[in-house]
């Protein structure tokens, strides 16, 4: 036996010695130039042995030819089972296949791409679109209430008459559902809300480095636009173009240096408008007297220099 590992079961002697027989099978499958040295064998079962041969193909470095041989009970003739190229311990192989739904990451969706949502997506739950509400005078589906024409009542399978919502009442319910954001086929479930809140809290939450150094939280910022629904208790949208979170959903405990009340700039001083006196006149000579001056000729001259 060679350096290849063998299993604990005792190999069949005839199958283990059929190295040349296995080599001929590998050569017949891949050609003489593609089959290298014998690497060893593995015991697959009673009178079943797999011989391994190195491959010389440069594109399959680390792979090996596996030739499985066997023989029948009390038979001395070894026969061929199969020949296949398998990766070895050091072979370069493709990573394990991952379904696209698990392989997709945020930001992978591009223009024109479609991302189907599973029918049983736990992030969603049925909304109220009103499409599943039958008219009171229509024939309902099987195992549902059946209406009576012209009346806002229905008959249960037991024969009891029960009141159902009229058309005006159903329209009012649909209007309220639209106001609450429920007038869709599916809406976010509690799980979907929690997952979204966890994502938003990581980047724009109270524990981010920006929030730790902020002078105040977003809950008191004038640029914070509150959300609707239950998320309004913890999140809002930043509308400050100079903030790193502009246009992003932020936690009310988040904050940055662009807080509206962080440093209120004083109003700049506006100078008074100039006053023009249009009533008084001040005569100015066109040709000033060059002989005149502030110093008389009789005044002794002053010494030049510093005093």
Image: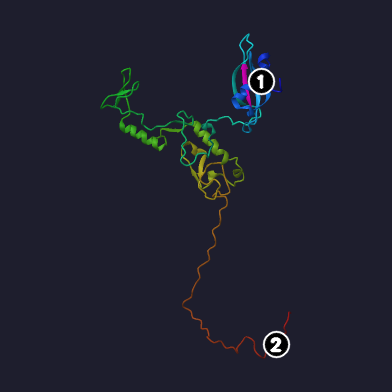
- Of marks 2 and 1, which one's residue comes earlier in the chain? 1
Numbered tag placed on residue 20 in the rendering: 1
Place of residue 97 in the rendered image (x, y in percent of width and height, measured from the top left): 56, 30
Q: Residue at x 61, y 43 (%)?
A: 209
Q: Residue at x 60, y 45 (%)?
A: 210
Numbered tag placed on residue 82 in the rendering: none
Assign the magenta stretch its main secondary structure: strand
Mark 2 sits on what residue?
301
Q: Which residues are magenta?
A: 64-69
Instruction: Say if 33 sits above or below 71 in the image.
Output: below
Quadrant where the C terminus is found in the figure: bottom right
* Most foreground residue, 174 or 33: 33
* Residue 133 occupies quadrant: top left
Place of residue 226 in the rendered image (x, y in percent of width and height, measured from the top left): 48, 42
* Most foreground residue, 207 or 123: 123
Place of residue 298 in the rendered image (x, y in percent of width and height, measured from the top left): 67, 91
């Amino acid at each position: 036996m060679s350096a290849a590992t063998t299993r604990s079961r005792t190999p069949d002697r005839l199958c283990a010695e059929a190295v040349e027989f296995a080599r001929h099978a590998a050569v017949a499958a891949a050609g003489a130039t593609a089959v290298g040295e014998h690497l060893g064998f593995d015991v697959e079962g009673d009178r079943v042995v797999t011989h391994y041969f190195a491959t010389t193909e440069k594109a399959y470095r680390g792979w090996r030819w596996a030739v499985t041989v066997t023989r029948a009970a009390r038979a001395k003739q070894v026969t061929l089972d199969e020949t296949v190229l398998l990766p070895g311990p050091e072979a370069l192989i493709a990573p394990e296949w991952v379904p696209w739904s698990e392989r997709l990451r945020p930001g992978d969706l591009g223009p024109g791409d479609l991302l189907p949502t599973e029918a049983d997506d736990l992030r969603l739950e049925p909304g109220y679109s009103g499409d599943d509400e039958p008219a009171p005078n229509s024939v309902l589906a099987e195992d549902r209430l059946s209406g009576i024409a012209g009346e806002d009542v229905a008959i249960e399978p037991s024969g009891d008459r029960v009141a159902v919502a009229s058309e005006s009442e159903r329209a009012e319910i649909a209007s309220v559902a639209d106001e609450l954001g429920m007038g869709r086929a599916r809406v976010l479930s509690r799980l979907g809300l929690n997952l979204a809140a966890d994502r938003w809290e990581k980047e724009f939450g109270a524990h981010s480095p920006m929030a730790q150094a902020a002078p105040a939280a977003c809950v008191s910022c004038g640029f914070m636009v509150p959300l609707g629904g239950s998320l309004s208790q913890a999140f809002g949208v930043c509308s400050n173009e100079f903030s790193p979170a502009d246009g992003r959903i932020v936690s009310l405990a988040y904050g940055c240096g662009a807080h509206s009340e962080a440093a209120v700039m004083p109003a700049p001083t506006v100078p008074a408008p100039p006053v023009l006196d249009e009533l008084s006149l001040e005569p100015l000579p066109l040709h000033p007297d060059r002989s005149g001056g502030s110093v008389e000729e009789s005044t002794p001259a002053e010494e030049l220099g510093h005093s």
